[in-house]
Image: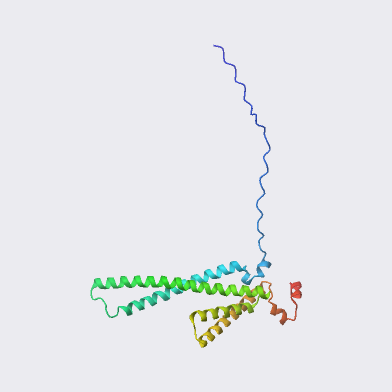
């Protein structure tokens, strides 16, 4: 038999088109410089500062609520069952089992309540502080004092304190706001943010302090 002729090579009919260039990467958001961060309280923008402080307040409230709620539930259980204490081993087992259940339930319930209350008050404090900062156009301890007094007033109104107790609560809010505000001003001054009252004390205008920086 005669050998079959070789099959001619098949050439691709598709032309080699140049590939389009890859799309450029999306622009990255500019990172704030240390000087820009220094203009914020605690060197943190307000959303981040509010989230961080509220989270810390929630965890603190949960811890305090668990301890206080468990202790209160244990004392209440002992007082309610003081007249009918068990006399057998099985009775004591059921007594402690019920007590542990009530202590655990009371601790969790009080933890949720305390965590929610503390987080709401802390969020209100920082929100009032930021609102007063924006209304005044400056950041100093005055806005923090207003925030402390506002939270103290809301706390007194919610609990319906008498006038004497409300006055003591307002005094405590004033002292806390003043102390925390001065701490923030000190940190801001170290970061290059001079409070407005410093310009008055040094008899300088804001433009002079900016040009000096």
Side of 146 relative to 94 (left or right): right
Q: Nearer the viewer, residue 183 or 162?
A: 162
The residue at the point 35 percent across, 72 percent down is 102
Seen in the picture, residue 99 relative to 10 is either above or below; the reply is below
| Residue farthest to the top, as pictured | 1
Q: Quadrant of the C terminus?
A: bottom right
The residue at the point 57 percent across, 69 percent down is 50
Quadrant of residue 96 in the image? Answer: bottom left
* Residue 175, image x, y percentages: 57, 82
Quadrant of residue 76 in the image? Answer: bottom left
Side of 128 relative to 83 (left or right): right
The residue at the point 37 percent across, 75 percent down is 73
* Residue 197, image x, y percentages: 69, 80
* Residue 31, image x, y percentages: 66, 61
The residue at the point 39 percent across, 77 percent down is 72
Quadrant of residue 192 in the image? Answer: bottom right
* Residue 24, image x, y percentages: 67, 49
Side of 88 relative to 120 (left or right): left
Q: Nearer the viewer, residue 149 or 36?
A: 149
Q: Quadrant of the N terminus?
A: top right
Side of 175 relative to 139 (left or right): left
């Amino acid at each position: 038999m005669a050998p079959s002729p070789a099959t001619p090579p098949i050439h691709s009919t598709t032309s080699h088109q140049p590939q389009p260039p890859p799309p450029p990467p999306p622009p990255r958001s500019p990172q704030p410089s240390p000087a820009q961060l220094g203009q914020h309280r605690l060197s943190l923008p307000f959303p981040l500062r509010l989230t961080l402080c509220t989270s810390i307040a929630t965890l603190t409230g949960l811890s305090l609520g668990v301890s206080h709620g468990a202790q209160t539930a244990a004392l209440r259980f002992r007082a309610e069952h003081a007249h009918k204490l068990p006399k057998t081993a099985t009775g004591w087992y059921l007594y402690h089992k019920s007590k542990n259940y009530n202590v655990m339930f009371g601790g969790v319930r009080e933890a949720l309540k305390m965590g929610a209350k503390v987080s709401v008050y802390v969020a209100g404090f920082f929100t009032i502080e930021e609102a007063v900062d924006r209304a005044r156009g400056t950041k100093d301890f005055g806005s923090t004092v207003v925030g402390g007094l506002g939270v103290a007033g809301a706390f007194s109104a919610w609990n319906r304190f008498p006038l004497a107790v409300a006055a003591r609560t307002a005094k405590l809010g004033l002292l806390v706001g003043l102390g925390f505000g001065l701490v923030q001003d000190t940190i801001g001054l170290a970061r290059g943010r001079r409070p407005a009252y410093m310009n008055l004390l040094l008899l300088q205008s804001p433009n002079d302090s900016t040009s000096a920086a």
